[in-house]
Amino acid sequence: HYEILIGQCNRDGFATCKFDSAYKAGYSAYAPDMAILNQCPPFLADVTITLVMGTWCGDSKEWVPRFYKVMDQVGFNYKKMKLIAVDRDKKAGDIDIAELKIERVPTFIFYRKNKELGRIIEVPYDLIEKDMLKIISGK
């Protein structure tokens, strides 16, 4: 019984709902593996990202702040990222996301030249930065 974000947004929108406190705490607490981060920039140059999340979702509260910390550390250009917030039914208001085939959130989708490279769905297998590097490097 509290407001959630729905539709396309950016992280400034987190301040409008309860997600903000979890975001700030998770972002501050996370210490990414710098050895992994230092390998990412060359692979990110032509990558775009779609992040589908729920501000109501526990996994989004855990992993979205960590993801933003990683992306800030590598100097990612957020003009190349689309953030879509969904409700509990995985609907994004007026935005049709059916083609993304979202079953769980958060879902981080990485693209190169409009071709999907891979996804991190709900929870990474390892560190979020390590899973991302595997996807974007193809290794």
Image: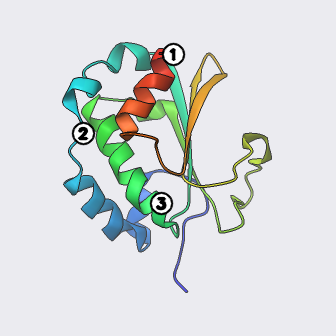
Q: Is residue 20 left or right of residue 1?
A: left
Structural crowding at the residue carrying mark 3, measured as other residues with C-alpha within 10 Å and reported as few (<14), some (14–19) or many (≥20): some
Mark 3 to mark 1 CA distance (whole Å): 25 Å
Residue 67 pos. (x, y %): 38, 44
Total number of numbered discs in the rendering: 3
Q: Which residue is mark 1?
A: 138
Q: CA distance from mark 2 to mark 1?
A: 21 Å
Identify the image quadrant of residue 53: bottom right
**First in sequence: mark 2 or mark 1?**
2
Above or below, comparing residue 47 to residue 70 in the picture: above
Mark 2, residues whose alpha carbon is within 10 Å: few (<14), some, or many (≥20)?
some
Q: Are marks 2 and 1 in contact (CB under 8 Å)?
A: no
Residue type at numbered disc 2: Pro
Task: Determine the residue positioned at 21% across, 56% down.
Answer: 29
Identify residue type, mark 3: Asp
The disc at residue 59 is: 3
Helix, strand or loop for disc 1: loop
Q: In which image quadrant can residue 110 be found?
A: top right
Query: Left or right of 96: which side holds 106?
Result: left
Among the two numbered marks 3 and 1 on one chain, the one whose residue lies closer to the N terminus: 3
Secondary structure under tag 2 reads loop
> Real-space Cα distance between discs 3 and 2?
18 Å
Q: Which mark is residue 32?
A: 2
Residue 35 location, x and y as percent? 21, 24
Look at label 1 and name its amino acid: Gly
Applied colour scheme: rainbow
